[in-house]
Image: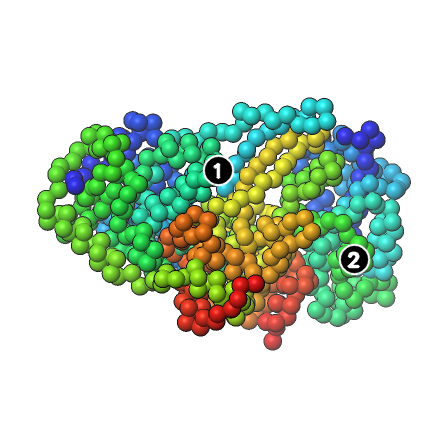
Amino acid sequence: MVIIGFTHFDELLSALRKRDYTVIGPVARDGAIALDVILSASDLPKGCHDEQQPGSYFLRHEEDEAIFGYVVGPQSWKKYLYPPRLKLFSAKREGKGFEIVSDSATPSPKYAFLGVRPCEIGAIKINDSVFDGGQYSDARYVSTRKDACVIAVNCTRPAGNCFCVSMNTGPRATHAFDLALTEICENGTHHFVVDVGSELGQSILEDVTHRQAEKNEIERALDLLSTSAAGMCKSLETEGLPQLLNDNYEHPEWDDVAKRCLACANCTMVCPTCFCSTVDDITDLTGDHAERWRRWDSCFTSDFTKIAGGNIRMSTRTRYRQWMMHKLAHWHDQFGTSGCVGCGRCITWCPVGIDITHEAQHIRETSISTINS
Amino acid sequence: MPAKKPKLAVFKFASCDGCQLSLLDAEDELLPVAGAVEIANFPEASRRVLRGPYDIGLVEGSITTPHDVERIRHIRKECKVLITIGACATAGGIQALRNWKDVKEFTRLVYASPEHISTLDRSMPVGSYVHVDFELRGCPINKYQLLEVVNAYLNKRKPNIPAHSLCIDCKTKGNICVMVAKGTPCLGPVTQVGCGAICPSFNRGCYGCFGPMENPNPASLSKQLKELEMGNHDIMLLFRGFNAYAEAFRKESDAHEK
Ligand code: SF4
Ligand code: SF4
Ligand code: SF4
Ligand code: SF4
């Protein structure tokens, strides 16, 4: 492991730009951490610390110099990997049908994602299995992802809704990054302990002033990360969870959560692994030119489950159940992993603070074994 | 495109004309619309009136007088497709606030000779008197939604007008939620999308201009508003806005009235 001093951090950004990356990273905006283009280290949120609770988020500003002193905000890298709105193609009328004008999909820039948290690496790996795993792959996702450079940041302090330890995704990044940084900002020291994860990461590092890390510096970083893991207040018991939920398909808790759930879909919008979308076909007034746009959709909307003959999920009860069971049960059948990486976003950004870990725990404690209907 | 241009007529009831003006406001887009349809009646734009029947009728405003009732029934017969535009036509509008009071008392206070005023007790949405084919929400409507619905009609396709929560647009725009990050009361989680999340984009809570979304849950939102230290009276007022008489908002405001 090596050390990059805070004063040389801008060299990292230059090294990325030199390789034609558009650097995306955290910025403080409107009282929270958002993701946006980063031009220099001064764009990063200095001295910002987040406090997260179910349905509540607060960004504290302090005098310290830490630039990664917070964890995940409402946005995630899916904003760039599969944008909320994307034109898929345009078409023009030819006789009785339409001809697709295929060159319309705008290619994405080459991104360097700076400040990817360990749970988010887990989420990106899940995105990979969704968009590039099976019979069908999403060409735009695949190329954006292939070109992307991942600079991870380990979490030396979890937020109130983090439960990555339960989901085995954090708070330390172990794979799928080019570089992983642990920020140490204490007692007059401000530097990053850096793990190199790929050849690309190694070559970027060559352009940045660094030195070998001392044993005690590595130990301090590892210490902070184990304290962080130990200090995580939230957890999700995953043992046998898919079966448990399948057995409790008719549990009264689904009715109870439906009383609280607004079906507003905030949870699915902020979840880094929720990937559902719909398409809108639009035309100009003449009807001679058409476009197909993809936009994020959610299992909480009514249109989502409207099929020929009616709607298969009319109530909020069935929609919440669908969402949670997909994340925690059916995902295993579909993709071989849990769909939840424990980032806590759905809990923080739910306007009424519905907590997926509490719902699961409640069902576990009051489990009724029903036959699946 | 059909050989004969469809006839489009705009009708006005109790309203401020803001929704009609939204169509005029779509200057760049209005010319092609004017080319694609025959505008048979559009009081804000032209004095020319063509006789019915009409292919598309856009109705602005709420029904507030016995004469309105006669007129809307007649208009319904004249229009193949009837689309209500705006909070007045779809929910009774801001003037539906009078539905909670005695209207005679208002007429006595406002008019010198109240005996000449002929009015109904309540300001009601068009849909409570005649069948409505499509509702365009908003106070005022979003001009792009209006163009979309006319466009969809002309091209015989489904209009892309979703009925889900405002939060979806708010999040896809990249806004930071004012309710979660600032504790600002916001009706977004119970309000239908369509405005482009204007208020939260300017760090304000949503006022519910587009009315209740598909299966809304205002009771749960109110509970959270109480957590944010909003009192019953303020919650009542929040739901009693432009869409006060839309059922879900009406019930919720009533539930918080002392
Ligand atoms: S869940 Fe874990 S990895 Fe994710 S932000 Fe929180 S502490 Fe970091
Ligand atoms: S379900 Fe919630 S905690 Fe799990 S990954 Fe999605 S947003 Fe994060
Ligand atoms: S769980 Fe929360 S965020 Fe998700 S739809 Fe329900 S109320 Fe909205
Ligand atoms: S600001 Fe309002 S509309 Fe936007 S996500 Fe929050 S609750 Fe929904």
Q: Which residue is mark 1?
A: A135
- Extreme residue in the right direction: B51
**The C terminus of chain A - image quarter:** bottom right
Q: Tag 1: Cα neighbours inside 10 Å, few (<14), some, or many (≥20)?
A: few
Residue A368 lies, in percent from the top left, at 48, 71
State the SS at label 1: loop
Mark in the foreground, 2 or 1: 1
Q: What percent of the width, then of the height, locates residue A234?
A: 34, 62
Q: Is residue B22 visible?
A: no
Establish if B220 lies above or below B148. Answer: below
Q: Residues within 10 Å of mark 2 (few under 14, many from 20)?
A: many
Mark 2: secondary structure: loop
Q: Position of residue B83 (x, y in %)?
A: 75, 47
Expressed as whole percent of the image width and height from the top left, the position of residue A309 reads 69, 51
Q: Which residue is found at the position 34% from the left and 41% from the top?
A: A25
The amino acid sitting under disc 2 is Ile
**Would you name the residue on which mark 2 appears?**
B63
Q: Which of the two residues, A87 or A33, is positioned nearer the viewer here?
A: A87
Taking the spot 66% from the left edge, 33% from the top edge, the residue there is A283
- The reply to whether residue B73 is in sight is yes
- Which picture quadrant has residue A194? top left
Relative depth, front residue between B167 and B33:
B167
Residue B189 vs A296, above or below: the answer is: below
